[in-house]
Amino acid sequence: EPGFLTDEQIIAENQFLFKEGFDPKQAKRASYDLKLGEEVYITGQDYPQMLTEHRQYVSIPRGQFALLMTKEYVKVPNDYFALISVRFGKKELGLINVSGFHVDPGFKGKIQFSVFNAGPADIVLQYNEPTFMIFFYKLAKQVLRPYNGERQYQEHLPVSTVTSLKGTSASLADVDKRVSSLETKEKVYWALLLALVGALVAVFLRQ
């Protein structure tokens, strides 16, 4: 019967939905919490960085883009459709998913998230931490043409995507620095002007 899978159904059907990385504790209500995988790329870096048990944390500066991979290798059957999202706790900090919001029937691989830190501060993420969500929807029947694109069977960040984000971006962080610089200059100008006016008033009062 068509509809979203519950936590009980996700656990029962996990062998059809995941190739590796499945954790039954991450199935909650009508979704599954996906964990942050090993590969992370942040705008401006030369190469992706690898997270490990000994190097668990990565900081996404405010106003910067990042590419993230899930730890889980997902399999979406031909009669299923999936929706993906960043978990609310991360959204609340300002982490926005700017890539797709669905996974096609037939897709197999680790899911890539392109995110943007629109929050007021840097956002720290931890390796193997629940960071994303996936909702599985069972269709009435199998699709005629399941997914078979360039991301099929992906386990690493695509070189083409990393290359497109390489280099210094005209990000909100850059804009913020420029605005802060202008505000500082304006404060200095106003301070000098007030000091000058004060000095002139003092001179006139002495006369």
Image: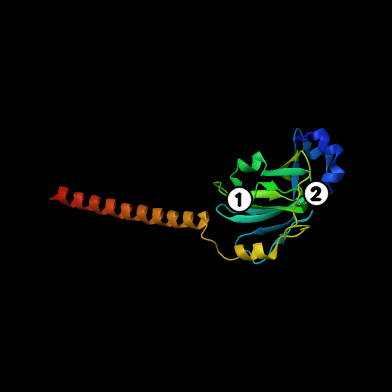
State the residue in front, 11 or 179. 11
Spot occupied by residue 21 in the image (x, y as percentages of width and height): 83, 48
Task: Please give left or right for residue 205 compared with residue 48 in the image.
Answer: left
State the residue in front, 160 or 179. 160
Q: Is residue 47 above or below residue 109?
A: below
What's the coloring here? rainbow
Spot occupied by residue 61 in the image (x, y as percentages of width and height): 59, 54
Q: Residue at x 60, y 60 (%)?
A: 43
Residue on which disc 2 sits: 75
Spot occupied by residue 157 in the image (x, y as percentages of width and height): 71, 60
Instruction: Give amino acid for label 2.
Output: Lys
Q: Is residue 112 visible to the viewer in this orientation of the structure? A: yes
Report the disc number at residue 187.
Answer: none
Report the disc number at residue 98.
Answer: 1
Q: Secondary structure at mark 2?
A: strand
Distance in Å between CA atoms under marks 2 and 1: 22 Å
